[in-house]
Image: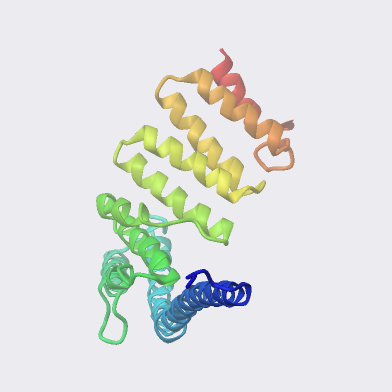
Amino acid sequence: MSNQNTPKENLDQQSENTEKSLLARNSKLLTAAIIIAVIAFGVFAVQYFYVQPKEEKAQSNLTLGLQYVEEAAQLNAQATSMTAMPDSLLTDSVKAAAENIKKQVADTYQKALNGDGRFPGFIKLSKESMTDAANIAAANAGLCYYNMNNYKEAIKYLEQFSPQDDKSLSAQYIAALANCYVAEKATDKAISAFQEAADIADNAILSPTYLLEAGKLFESQGKNEEALKIYQTIKSTYPESEIVTPQPIQGAFVALIDKYIERVSK
């Protein structure tokens, strides 16, 4: 008896094999789809149940901290105005009052940095991963240290900051970092930071100011050619800026930037 299958049997066998192949492939596709769905849900769950609430809480805490920064700035302005009085009005009692206010300023910055019981402080908040508030908290921790003349700690936190959508604010944080570098005599880093701040700001008010600082630092290093390039960039790129627009000086209209260009061109 022959073992060969009939045409019908061969067709049935092929059909069965095809069905098994399709089922296997569909099973793999279904498994992959389930895995993707689980991952997608996991990402959504982390975002919705963990990241979003954490971000909202961090933003709320950040607002409390910024209130301390504002309070310290107001107190500092008050102390500065008192010590700027004419000698005839700068009595011992006024000096003592100014010193007392300065102590309040330092205490307020410490609260902003380390918290007060209801607010965790910028330092702790800056360590909150997966939040935008942590980025801003690090920058403000740096600003607090900067205003306390603790430049090394200021650099530590300002270097953690990553520029965000608010170009002007981001540029000011980077410029603060540049000023810290200047205080620590890290001139090359300061120049790079001022140039970065100018690029981020990208406007006719802040950018020329930051570039001017970079140019003056080049001058301090005796690099007049580099300084000249910076000053010429200011003049050509920001013609409407106050630095470039001629201003009345001693009866004549003079552009401030031309004074700098003339100085390094000699």
Question: Looking at the figure, which quarter contains the C terminus?
Answer: top right
Residue 165 appears at what percent x and percent y? 57, 61
Taking the view exactly as shown, the residue that stands out farthest to the top is 266
Residue 80 appears at what percent x and percent y? 39, 61
Point 25% across, 69% down: residue: 103
Q: Nearer the viewer, residue 39 or 148?
A: 39
> What colour scheme has been applied to the protein in the rendered image?
rainbow
Q: Is residue 20 visible?
A: yes
Q: Nearer the viewer, residue 32 or 198?
A: 32
When the figure is inspected, residue 86 is found, relative to residue 238, above or below; the finding is below
Point 42% across, 74% down: residue: 66
Q: Is residue 160 left or right of residue 250?
A: left
Point 44% across, 35% down: residue: 191
Taking the view exactly as shown, the residue that stands out farthest to the front is 1
When the figure is inspected, residue 170 is found, relative to residue 7, above or below; the finding is above
Q: Quadrant of residue 50?
A: bottom left
Residue 81 appears at what percent x and percent y? 43, 62
When the figure is inspected, residue 197 is found, relative to residue 140, above or below; the finding is above
Residue 171 appears at what percent x and percent y? 52, 52
Q: Is residue 89 visible?
A: no
Q: Is residue 175 left or right of residue 202?
A: left
Q: Nearer the viewer, residue 39 or 254?
A: 39
Q: Quadrant of residue 82?
A: bottom left
Point 32% across, 82% down: residue: 119
**Number of residue marks:** 0
Q: Is residue 95 left or right of residue 251?
A: left
